[in-house]
Amino acid sequence: MRNLFLLSVLGLGIFLTACSSATASSGAVDAVEAYVHAIVENDPSKLSALSCADWETDALTELDSFQAVKTSLEGFSCQESGIDGANTLVVCQGKIIASYNGENQELDLSTRTYQVIEQGGNWLVCGVQ
């Protein structure tokens, strides 16, 4: 009986740890997903709010590159892939489709790894590898 109780307590501890890890990591994933949506929606203020100060200029430059095209997302999803120093790494699947004069160009998001940091309780994109 005592072994069953200890096994139950251990199982509950593992379950709660897994749940809290999933919740903590989702902040970085949510930030990247919102960041990519801000690019596709051509929303510079939202993009700035989702970028750390060191990356904001680069983020806005990337947004400028989509100004003359209509953009959409295809097959988009993201997941945390690891840690690099203070950065949480997030990878995504899917494509940004940029359409201009009836021609589509695809930006494969799987070739990028987003660097995300937590500052003041906010998750911010702070680079791309």
Image (spheres, helix red, strand yellow):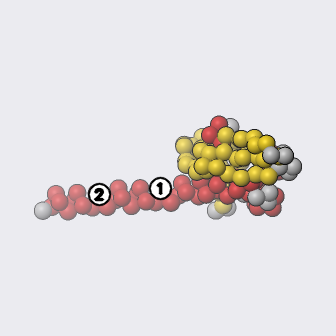
Task: Identify the residue at image location x=83%, y=49%.
Answer: 69
Label 1 is placed on what type of residue? Ser
Residue 78 located left or right of residue 105? left
Q: Sequence order check: which comes first, mark 2 or mark 1?
A: 2
- Tell me where residue 124 appears, x and y as whole percent: 69, 54
Residue 108: quarter of image: top right
In the image, residue 2 sits, relative to residue 114, either above or below, namely: below
Mark 2 secondary-structure assignment:
helix
Which residue occupies the foreground of this view, 102 or 47?
A: 102
The alpha-carbon separation of the residues under discs 2 and 1 comes to 15 Å
Whether residue 10 is visible, yes or no, is yes
Please give the residue where the numbered disc 2 appears in the rendered image. Answer: 11
Whether residue 86 is visible, yes or no, is no
Task: Identify the residue at image location x=47%, y=55%.
Answer: 21
Number of marks: 2
Please give the residue where the numbered disc 1 appears in the rendered image. Answer: 21
Task: Identify the residue at image location x=29%, y=57%.
Answer: 11
Q: Dot 2: few (<14), some (14–19), or many (≥20) neighbours within 10 Å?
A: few
Residue 28 located left or right of residue 126? left
